[in-house]
Image (tube, helix red, strand yellow):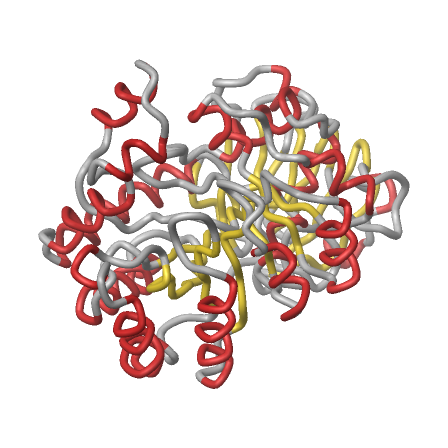
Amino acid sequence: MTNLLLTGIGELVTNDPEREGLLGVVTDAAVAVKGGRIAWVGPETELLREFRELPELDGAGRAVLPGFVDSHTHLVFGGNRADEFARRVRGESYQEIMAAGGGIMSTVASTRATDSDTLLDEAVRRAQRMLGMGTTTVEVKSGYGLEVETELRMLEVANSIAEYVPIDVVTTFLGAHVVPAEYEDDRDAYLRLIVEEMLPAAGGMATFCDVFCDDGAFAVDEARVILAAAAEQGLAARLHANQLGHSGGASLAAELGAITADHLDHLTDADIAGLLAAGTVAVLFPTVSFSLRLDPPPARRLWDAGVPVAIATDCNPGTSYVENMQFVIAAATLTTGLTPEESVWAATRGGARALQFDDRGWIKPGTVADLVMLEADSYLEIPYRPGTDLVRMVIKGGEAVVS
């Protein structure tokens, strides 16, 4: 935790609803940090005398944003699925690859066979790259073990990342990713394993429980049972929902008041109304549709209806091996119908809401001093220049951790 005075900011994105516009932009701005939290924000001409003695850093007219909050990733995994990527490009569908033993089950086999030290080393390297590109908070799921030992090892690895990288990690239990091959003929036995063994063990190791409620994964009734058991362990509900078809996952998320419903590629107006009424955050992945060459998620419909929207990498080895939230912002702007302002909000404040953080994703007194300085004078450069890493500096808790 440090004290800092950041001056000479050409364009400051605050996301503060008390300021003008969605992003609450302040030009020619300054930010004062004390004890790792924001103490003051405003035009530099209005800077209070009490902050002028803080160690000063000159922004030299550059743009500054809140740190990106990547609210959905599968950062811990073993193996590689570049071969499946090539098969998809040649015309095989994701469902066909899964039916042939690829997809999630391929990564499950590799992850089970990879020792914890290797899993941690590879996850730390991914997290380091994410931090370098502006992500200061990241959610990490289990879900590539599908048996007690490996699911717990994955959570242990995820919880260890922050010991090696100055990034905040939020963990999610996803033992209900798919039914593993050894339980194909006895789904009820696998449900019992999740409810009776996995969840009690994972309860103290994760914040959320996620269920892949979709075609080929878990049915609505199964997901309801799992999430009820998760609630008894103190885990808040999230859902992979309506990615592959109109599975009923979105309506279940609304019914349960889930914190998030993620993917949502297939939605009815009733689904959207339910999510809005429940206050559920829609977490969308424009880089998944980009990678799979599918129609983009219905971000415009959700936003216009008033549903809070977050965008995330869904970093995983199969459908979106993306670590860069800048690229996610560009993809959201260029493919989903969101404006640059909406995409930036969804990657910062929207992501924070998806993880139930009220102290990040925006820049105002009292929030964590997680800041990204661009090598550019405007946030508009992010979607305008897709593929370019524009991050000059990352400040985590008031300390420059990437420069």
Please state the horizontal and vertical placement of residue 260, each as a whole percent of the image: 60, 58
Could you say where residue 159 lies in the image, as x and y percent from the top left? Answer: 33, 64
Q: Residue drawn at (53%, 62%), measured in percent from left and top?
A: 238
Quarter of the figure with residue 39:
bottom right
Q: Residue furthest front?
A: 185
Q: Nearer the viewer, residue 155 or 112?
A: 112
| Image quadrant in which you'd find residue 182 | bottom left
Residue under the image location 40 percent in, 40 percent down: 315
Total number of numbered discs in the rendering:
0
Residue 97 appears in the picture as rendered: yes
In this picture, is 238 found above or below 198?
above
Query: Could you tell whether 201 is left or right of 23 in the image?
Result: left
When the figure is inspected, residue 111 is found, relative to residue 254, above or below; the finding is: above
Q: In the image, 8: left or right of 84? A: right
Q: Is residue 308 left or right of residue 288?
A: right
Residue occupying image coordinates x 73% and y 35%: 342
Q: Is residue 220 above or below residue 321?
A: below
In front of the other: 281 or 193: 193
Looking at the picture, how far across and down is residue 88, in whole percent? Answer: 33, 22
Residue drawn at x 36%, y 49% is 74
Residue 34 in view (yes/no): no
| Rendered location of residue 371, percent (x, y) | 59, 45
Along the line of sight, the residue nearer the viewer: 108 or 247 = 247
> In the rendered image, which quarter contains the C terminus?
top left
